[in-house]
Image: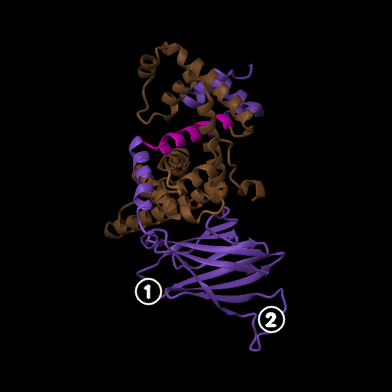
Amino acid sequence: MGDEQLRLRNTTVHPSTTDLVTRCLAGNASAWDALVQRFAGLVHSVPVRHGLSPMEVDDVGQEVFLALARHLDRIENPEALPAWLLITARRLSWRAVQKRRQEINLVTDDNPNTNEQNRDSSLQMPGMETLLAGWQRQEALQNGLNRLDVKCRSLLWMLFLDRQEPSYEEISAHLSVPIGSIGPTRTRCLGKLRSILNSLGFPSAF
Amino acid sequence: MDHFDDVRLDAFIFDAVPLGAEETSHVAECPLCRERIAARSLLREELNNARQSHPTPQQLNRYSRLFDAVAVQSLGQRLGPLLATLRLALVMDSRQGALGLRRAAGFGHRLLYSSDQVDVELLVEPEGSTWHIDGDVLPFDPDTIDPPYLVELQISHESDSMADPPLYAAPSEASGRFRLAGVLSGRYLLSLTPARGPVIEIPGLEIP
């Protein structure tokens, strides 16, 4: 693994992670909220890559932020926080995978005819390089989407990020755009997103 | 045929509009098209991951409240069982002879680390210009620490509270045995995350 891949870039965002951690340690709850806002999706992306269920993803997120709250006063280099979050999320995801596998084994012990392979197929154990690269892509996406104009951000949000997965009809009604223009507008917005990612230094992200 | 335009490519990737016969044969002969398709497929995958990862307002609210919950606890209460760590100390190094003399470098050696709950035995052997580490985790009470373990080797820092991502990682066998191969010389922090129980840490592990 190359040395560059081992480090998570701290994308230039304001306030910096160091500022936020310093303010958290001074008891500033809004700085903590900002840390949570900045990293919750990235932390969740780790258990998602392990194939864990939404409830398990939630458990991992809860435990990571609880561990962070407990460890805050021991952080000596806040710029390394993304790496710490990734490592911690990975360890907790590992545990969740093992727990699920044990439960599956219990089920299969009770029901020898159960097809274990099928029941376990969603679980993954991605390597650290995969997780690092994925974290960086998620961070790039997050930064890129935040810099898009409102129209594009709203459209891409509804198309790709809204958990309700609205239909084209619903998107058309919500954004007041003809259904027929959604595809071409999506293409233009994805093009803008790629340009922004290039300008942020993620030329090969997608 | 001409290259795909972006709208057609996006329809193929994001709307699963299938390629026609002519388009399929074009892709087969067009490395640039395949590259563009691969990039969009990766984007689709990451957008899907982002959708599943995006925190709900309720989740953000719960995570936010953790700060208050922890901030009002005393330090003693903070050191709860969640992600608790066990730090092991070196109790035996086979390179140390009976008179405390170190054997010549280049041979394999055994190390035994211990705490009041678990022993970890390591066999470090050369393999070309690198080393491999065979390990065995031996909990005193199998009910408190469950294998398998996620084994991670990180560069050791003065303070390990914020470490770099691991350079080497592997899952252990169900028995707790593990192997890390191709390890370069250095000073490491070895971490073993069990399926259940505290994270086991061996700080300052010297690979010669």
Residue at x-position 51% and y-position 46%: A22
- Dot 1 surroundings within 10 Å: few (below 14), some, or many (20 or more)? few
Read off the chain for label 2.
B
Q: Position of residue B144 (x, y in %)?
A: 36, 68
- Mark identifier at residue B130: none
Farthest residue toward the front?
A: A26
Q: Which mark is residue B102?
A: 2
Q: The purple chain is which one?
A: B
* Residue A101, magenta (yes or no): no
Magenta residues, dominant SS class:
helix
Judge whether B204 appears above or below B140 on screen.
Answer: above
Residue B23: give x, y in percent of width and height: 57, 21
Q: Can residue A152 be seen in this view?
A: yes
> At which x and y percent is residue A203?
64, 32
- Residue B141's label in the rendered image is 1
Q: Which residue is drawn at 37% across and 27% down?
A: A165
Instruction: Give the magenta part as a residue range.
Output: B38-56
Q: Which chain is brown?
A: A
Q: Can residue B30 be seen in this view?
A: no
In the image, A58 versus B110, the foreground residue is: A58
In percent of width and height, residue B181 lies at 61, 62
SS at badge 2: loop
Going by the numbered disc 1, the residue's amino acid type is Asp
* Structural distance between the alpha carbons of marks 2 and 1: 34 Å
Locate residue B166: give its quadrant.
bottom right
Q: What residue type is labelled 2?
A: Arg
Disc nearer the start of the sequence (2/1):
2
Letter of the chain that mark 1 sits on in the rendering: B
